[in-house]
Image (spheres, helix red, strand yellow):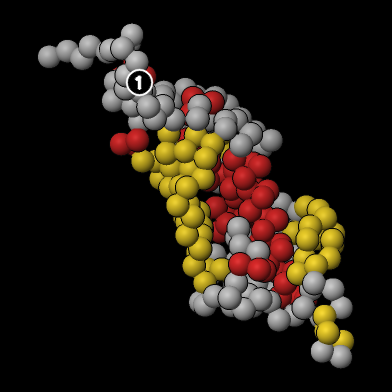
Amino acid sequence: MATVEPKFSGVHIAQPAGQMFTVDIAQSAFLDDNTTGGGRCSPCGAHDFATKPTTLNESLKVSRGQLRYKLMMNALGIRSNFQVHNIVTTYASDAGDNPITDLNFTLIFDTADFIPTTGTTIDGSTATTTKAQFIRDKIAEALNTTHTENVNVYDPTEVGGVKVRELSNTAVTVGPVMATSIGEIVEAITVTEITTFRPNTANQTPTDNALTYSAE
């Protein structure tokens, strides 16, 4: 049997043409203190919670989590445009003083052939042989970096029952989410390709071209 592609009929059988990956970041072992390592990684801001953070320190953790999420998105977009779908954040409750324990989302890359398959994880312990492993490594880099940026921070501080200021533009510094081992950061991240998302015909299926890379 043979497959004949309707190239001139306007039927785009190759859609979707990218590749889909699911991401799970287990964060229970990540820091949750008032150091630059605290705050974990989350897209949620202070106003997303039913109960906002009750202290400035707790609010700074939320801002650090958001900043890490931004850094992670920046790292993932180095080689190809992508979309994020199906974000699920897991907390003990919907109060801003609680740390995130798990983050799940789906990535759809527009040009999957631009994603390398060869390299070494950031801790130097494991060879990278798949695109999923490269994605995992870029996430780990974002969670292990030190970065300072001005961000909006919710400030619950009150004087005489009145908030001093609701929001402040503050220089926030994030550091590695774990102080013990870079390898444990990598181990907390699971990336899995959803192969059924690929096109149906072999000549349109993204290839695993081996590209050597180093940390950008």
Q: Position of residue 49 (x, y in %)?
A: 60, 72
Name which residue type carries label 1: His
At a point 42% along the width and 39% down the height, the residue shown is 20
> Compared to 3, does 129 lie above or below?
below
Q: Position of residue 183 (x, y in %)?
A: 57, 54
Along the horizontal axis of the image, is 148 left or right of 117? right
At a point 71% along the width and 63% down the height, the residue shown is 63
At a point 80% along the width and 72% down the height, the residue shown is 166
Residue positioned most to the bottom = 160
Q: Position of residue 179 (x, y in %)?
A: 68, 64
The answer, for residue 144, to whether it is visible in the render is no
Given residues 126 and 60, the one toward you in this image is: 60
The answer, for residue 49, to whether it is visible in the render is yes
Given residues 65 and 192, the one toward you in this image is: 65
Question: Can you say which quadrant of the picture contains the N terminus?
Answer: top left
Question: Can you say which quadrant of the picture contains the C terminus?
Answer: top right
Given residues 13 and 21, the one toward you in this image is: 13
At a point 71% along the width and 62% down the height, the residue shown is 64
Along the horizontal axis of the image, is 176 left or right of 48? right
Task: Kindly state the secondary structure of the residue where label 1 is placed.
Answer: loop
> Compared to 55, does 213 lie above or below?
above
Along the horizontal axis of the image, is 58 left or right of 208? right
Q: Quadrant of residue 59?
A: bottom right
- Circle 1 residues within 10 Å: few <14, some 14–19, many ≥20: few
Q: How many marks?
A: 1
Q: Position of residue 16 (x, y in %)?
A: 39, 30
> Compared to 198, does 174 lie above or below?
below
Residue of label 1: 12
